[in-house]
Amino acid sequence: MPRTEIELPYRLEFLSILDQEGRADTSLDPGLPDELLLRLYRGMLLARFFDDRMLILQRQGRIGTFAPTKGQEAQVGAVAPLEPDDWLVPSFREMPAEVWRGKSLQSVLLFYAGYNEGGFVPPGLNNLPVSVPVGTQMLHAVGIGYGMKYRGKKNVVMTFFGDGATSEGDFHEAMNFAGVFRTPVIFICQNNHWAISLPRNKQTRSRTIAQKALGYGIQGIQVDGNDVLAVYAAAKEAVERARAGDGPTLIESVTYRLSVHTTADDPKKYRKQEEVDEWLRRDPLVRFRNYLSGRGLLSEEKAGGMEDEVKAEIKAAEEDWAGRVEKPLDPLEMFTYAYAEPPPYLRMQRDELARELEARRGDTKKESVARD
């Protein structure tokens, strides 16, 4: 039998609307209302300033380690097309998206200060808590999407992950299940070029991450992840496709982590400053501000007023958070929130820790009496 070529109905696109200076391709501009454009800029600005403040708090020892989001604020464009009844399933670098969806700044600070309350999701807010294990949240997203489709609902799920997560089995399992069952899931890969210290070119031989969608029979697109308009346009198209019952989409958002992987990381040991400087010239916040200024929507005075407003919001949230964390943490609370009915081995561990803590308190009292 002769060899014959298999015809595959696949094509892949790269989408960018704003150039490096913030000038838009008018044929691709999604034509968003002025109010939404300014809200998107404010969301990005809030994320940038809050991220800067969190870094200071961490260095002061007031919160624990976290994953900064500087340079990746255009992710707010991805969640902007979602409805309140849709679901967001984040990893650990989606603070901007979470806050856009209604998560309070106070709860972010509580979470990174080690308080269980920071992981609490209020009723009506369809955000899952932060997922730290790499890639596991994609399976959760597909499960939610399958459940909604089974119930005949028209909602969608959006899940985020990094380029490093595409090497995990969870990624492939989630993509395969979503493709077979056409679940209403939008996969957002934040390709920031570094999986901690491993560069993207050592992560995969694929020319793009977006093309991995083709192997599972679903739609894929690569976008300029530092262009909030492009991110919005691609996400809106994917959301509409999923809501109409036409299955999932993989969006590769090409961006860059301008800061550390986490506050326990030193990127100077594995990447060059010249690379960082090159991506600084593509800063998503600067590009979008230039676009808005060019449209006459954001004057210097208006931009300054917005910055003052955002800083005041962050300060108020920090003061509220500081008032909540005055009480010392009770180590026994770590056993309280994982299970409705703790299994025997956890009850045993809790009792053992309680005895040890009580013994230590007794020793402390004896030392105090001896000193007196």
Image (cartoon, rainbow, N blue to C red):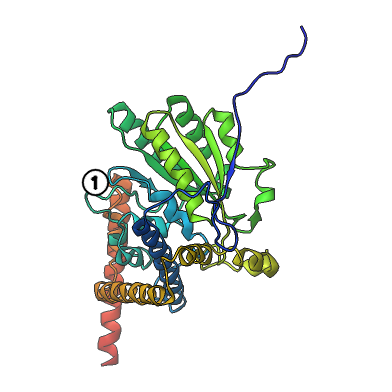
Q: Quadrant of the C terminus?
A: bottom left
The residue located at (48%, 28%) in the rendering is 179
Residue 371 image position (x, y, % from top left) = 29, 91
Question: 228 or 32, which is in the foreground?
Answer: 32
* The image quarter in which residue 48 lies: bottom left
Q: Decide if residue 99 is in sight here.
A: no
Report whether 221 appears left or right of 351: right
The residue located at (30%, 77%) in the rendering is 363
Query: Mark 1, residues whose alpha carbon is within 10 Å: few (<14), some, or many (≥20)?
Result: few
Is the residue 123 above or below the residue 249 in the image? Answer: below
Q: Residue furthest bottom?
A: 372
Is the residue 272 above or below the residue 204 in the image? Answer: below
Residue 272 image position (x, y, % from top left) = 69, 67
Is the residue 133 above or below the residue 44 in the image? Answer: above
Q: Which residue, given by chain and number where applicable, does mark 1 sit on?
A: 340
Q: Residue furthest top?
A: 1
